Amino acid sequence: MKYNAVIFDLDGVICHTDKYHYEAWKKIADELGIYFDETINNRLRGVSRMESFEIILERYDGVMSQEEKTEYTTKKNEVYKELLKNMSPADLSPEVKNTLDGLRGQGLKLAIGSSSKNAGFILEQLGLGGYFDAISDGNNISNSKPDPEVFLKAAQFVKEEPGSCLVVEDAKAGLEAAIAGGMDCAAIGDAVASGLATYNLNTFGDLADVVK
């Protein structure tokens, strides 16, 4: 085996919660009278909650205190969590589940490396609560991607050196984080176009060949 562990970004890789993020941010933007659309929403992928709000506020005319920013981002998260309750194991594609089971069957350790503070809740909703060997997420990091912290901690949690871990990402910032942490990375979705990845995946199932 080329690797001992595979670290997955959650959103856009294991599952897709983009629509819920979009709906929650849209609600906040509408409340503040800020223009917000899918294009702006795409800039928020893989970015922390506060940084996302700063991007939305680029179109805001007023001045907002740090306290107000915290209030609005907290509110966004509450709306988002309510929407996440709509998620179920039906949102986990059979291809993803079968591939994960296959990797585990080959003796690989599996971890999550996500900027989200809701990773645990999302995994529960998908029926993957307790499935991964480790979860490194927004609750245990102080720097979001492209800083490698989230992936380095995931490697630490599964007791592996960065060089023996493969990161799977759908965002350029995530690939940059993996590279900065000294890890090989596989790109899926939009991240393929960046040309940064060690491997480019057409589908999640391609991972089975990459790790051999």
Image (cartoon, helix red, strand yellow):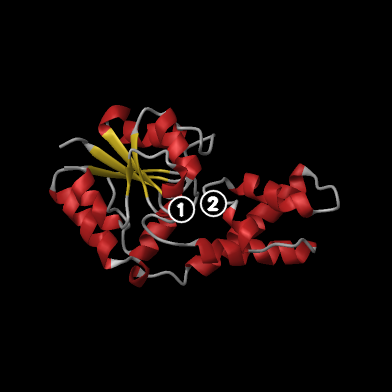
Whether residue 24 is visible to the viewer of this picture, yes or no, is yes
Whether residue 81 is visible to the viewer of this picture, yes or no, is no
Which residue is rendered at x = 50% and y = 41% of the image? 173
Residue 146, x across and y down, in percent = 51, 36
Residue 43, x across and y down, in percent = 60, 51
Which residue is rendered at x = 25% and y = 61% of the image? 97
Q: Which of marks 1 and 2 is in front?
A: 1
Packing grade of label 1 (10 A; few <14, some 14-19, many >=20) is few
Q: Mark 1 points at which residue?
A: 190
Query: Which dot marks residue 109?
Result: none
In this rendering, is residue 36 above or below 64? below
Q: Kindly indicate whether the residue at mark 2 contacts the one at mark 1 (C-beta within 8 angstroms).
A: yes
Distance (Cα) linking label 1 and label 2: 11 Å
Residue 50, x across and y down, in percent = 64, 46
Q: Name the residue under label 2.
A: 45
Quadrant into which the N terminus falls? top left
Q: Which of marks 1 and 2 is nearer the N terminus?
A: 2
Q: Return the residue nearer the eye: 37 or 60.
A: 37
The amino acid beneath tag 2 is Arg
The amino acid beneath tag 1 is Asp
Please state if 53 lies on the left or on the right of 148 as rendered: right
Q: Is mark 1 on a helix, strand or loop?
A: helix
